[in-house]
Image: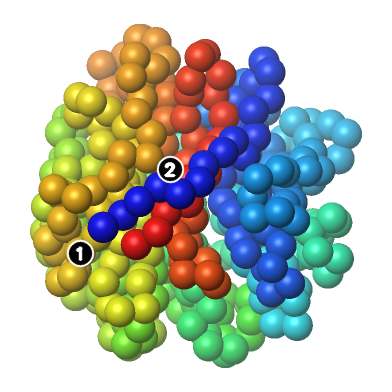
Amino acid sequence: MLEIIDEGILSKVPYRGAYMPSITELGDGSFIACQHVGLELGSPDNHIEVLWSADSCRNWNNQGSIHGAAPANDGWAYRGPDIQEGPNGRLIMTATRFEVGAGQLFDPDSEGLQRPEMILMWSDDGGRIWSQPQIVPVDLPPEKYTWNKAGDLIQLAPDRWMYPLETWKPEGYAGLPDQKAAAVFSTDQGETWGEFTVVADDPTGRRLWWDQMNTRLPDGRIYTMLWTHFYGTSEDLVNHWVVSADEGRSWSEPQLTNLQGQVCTPISLPDGRVAAIYNYRHEPQGVRIAVTEDLSHFDLENEVVVFDAGSEATLGEPDHENFLAEHMLIGFGKPKGVLLNDGTLLTFFWCTSGGATHTRWVRLTI
């Protein structure tokens, strides 16, 4: 059984939104978090903030933007950051940044994205000062593909790191998007990147594999869950999963779960079970968490609602009949979680309540 034992607000800022939080427990027992903030979910002013907590997430100290006094003036919009503790205590931040063009990051007419870059940033002082972005290259033709971060960096071994991604098409490309879930790998602790591996792909282009989220199982396999969508429609399939038994070099064919969700983050448990926190976008909408013993069938009778979206599940009406345009008006999303050293489950997500879009955390026992 899952049971909520504590919850609170990570960050709520007047007159702007906070989105896509990530919280990391550090080796000294303190917590560091990051998120992107801006006027809207995908507005050109999106930039990254870092926060700390020394009292198990109850109170947070917000350092503010890591980009300096004028974060929106460098020509990039920064989104979806995550922080990990690397070798010798060095902190690693992964994120995607998008070129700030004349229009929106996503053009609903052409379905093109402004050009993104997957990046790494490093901190040697506990997250107070960050390096300039290091670009993570991907060996795909840029005239046909864009690529952005999806899921968390996995330090599989000192000489093998995995950086998950998904593809789309750039602004100006007239063809259909060739969307796939994939990953690139480093053999020198993130200094250089090379090997490219496809995690899930549908050659027909019918099924889209969005927002892959991953976890390392106790037996060493990498278990990845995928939001699965029919291209050109508003129809989601059930969440699918794939697994790799060879450090990400090859992947199983996608298999069904019984979760009818969108972004879905698995969290490996020590006994071999997996907890999954996911967006449920059917009435009543919200964020839910359930547990599976076989990687496919989740115990829906005992799942827990960690956020009830109510009437603020969406924030307006889109001006295009395009699913991605609709999705830019969602009021909650990107739920994630980690198993803490004390055995409890810490989950976090962004949501809207009382007109304020902000980030929250919920701690549960299992």
Q: Earlier in the sequence, mark 2 or mark 1?
A: 1
Q: Is residue 84 visible?
A: yes
What percent of the width, then of the height, locates residue 10? 62, 39
Q: Is residue 295 above or below residue 302?
A: below
Q: Secondary structure beneath disc 1?
A: strand
Q: In the picture provided, is 62 more to the left or to the right than 241?
A: right
So how many labels did they put on this image? Answer: 2
Q: Which residue is mark 2?
A: 334
Q: Which mark is residue 292?
A: 1
Viewer-nearest residue: 104 or 298: 298
Image point (65%, 45%), residue name: 58
Q: Quadrant of residue 133?
A: bottom right
Image point (38%, 34%), residue name: 307
* Neighbourhood count class around disc 2 (C-alpha, 10 Å): few under 14, some 14–19, many 20 upward: many
Q: Which mark is residue 277?
A: none
Q: Nearer the viewer, mark 2 or mark 1?
A: 1
Image point (64%, 81%), residue name: 189
Q: In the picture provided, is 4 more to the left or to the right than 282?
A: right
Q: Amino acid at mark 2?
A: Lys
C-alpha gap between disc 2 and disc 1: 20 Å
Viewer-nearest residue: 271 or 109: 271
Q: Is residue 347 visible?
A: no
Image point (75%, 31%), residue name: 72
Q: Secondary structure beneath disc 2?
A: strand
Q: Amino acid at mark 1?
A: Thr
Q: Quadrant of the C terminus?
A: bottom left
